[in-house]
Image (spheres, helix red, strand yellow):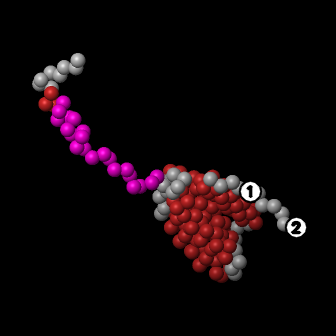
Amino acid sequence: MLRLNPRILPIFVLILNSCATASPAAPSATIDPCFPEAISETVKPINNLMREFDDASALSSNLPIEQLPEAISNLQRIRRLAQDINPPACLTALHGYELAHMNAVIDTLLAFLNGADTSTLNQGLNLAREQHDLYSVELARVLGLTLVPATASP
């Protein structure tokens, strides 16, 4: 038989009462931004800026040289917006590839404006492509998608 010391009994009753009246912790309404249920929404701000940058970059490659400074300024604006994003840990690699790609494109366009040689420009373009490919692979990984190589059309 269990016997309690009479001096401890009031403390024991107090502890039991406080446990019985304490409200259970409410479940957190915040979902981890890296959970599969949330990741597609979490990645949107990063991917939306990448898409905007890609569109502006494609446009800049078809502009006369006189209009390039304005186009580069727009690309820099988009890059600054991307730099201001503070991604969760699961998106730091994706965000890093995004910024590296943006920097490579902008640096290459600036080099072109400054009369860089073909070799330098080709290096810049190749680096920009590599970074964009790394971004695409990481985006697919984060979203749980499988990349399928494009097939040549007949």
- The image shows residue 45 at horizontal and vertical percentages of 52, 65
Amino acid type of disc 1? Answer: Val
Q: Dot 1: what SS? A: loop
The residue under the point 48% across, 55% down is 33
Q: Nearer the viewer, residue 35 or 137?
A: 35
- The image shows residue 108 at horizontal and vertical percentages of 66, 66
Q: Is 13 displayed left or right of 40 in the figure? A: left
What label sits on residue 154 in the rendered view? Answer: 2
**Picture quarter containing residue 99?**
bottom right
- The image shows residue 107 at horizontal and vertical percentages of 63, 65
Q: Is residue 28 found inside the magenta-colored segment of the image?
A: yes
Most distant residue in the front direction: 1
Magenta segment boundaries in residue numbering: 12-32
If you read the primary sequence from the N terminus, does the residue marked by circle 2 or circle 1 appear first? 1
Q: Is residue 29 above or below residue 72?
A: above
Amino acid type of disc 2? Answer: Pro
The residue under the point 56% across, 74% down is 73
Label 2: how many residues lie within 10 Å, few (<14), some (14-19) or many (20+)? few
User: In which quadrant is the C terminus drawn?
Assistant: bottom right
Q: Is residue 23 above or below residue 65?
A: above
The residue under the point 22% across, 20% down is 2
Residue assigned mark 1: 148
- The image shows residue 116 at horizontal and vertical percentages of 70, 67
Q: Is 127 displayed left or right of 80 in the figure? A: right
Q: Is residue 24 above or below residue 98?
A: above
Q: Is residue 43 above or below residue 57?
A: above
Q: Contact, CB < 8 Å: mark 2 with mark 1?
A: no
**Picture quarter containing residue 51?**
bottom right
The residue under the point 17% across, 35% down is 14
Q: Is residue 117 found inside the magenta-colored segment of the image?
A: no
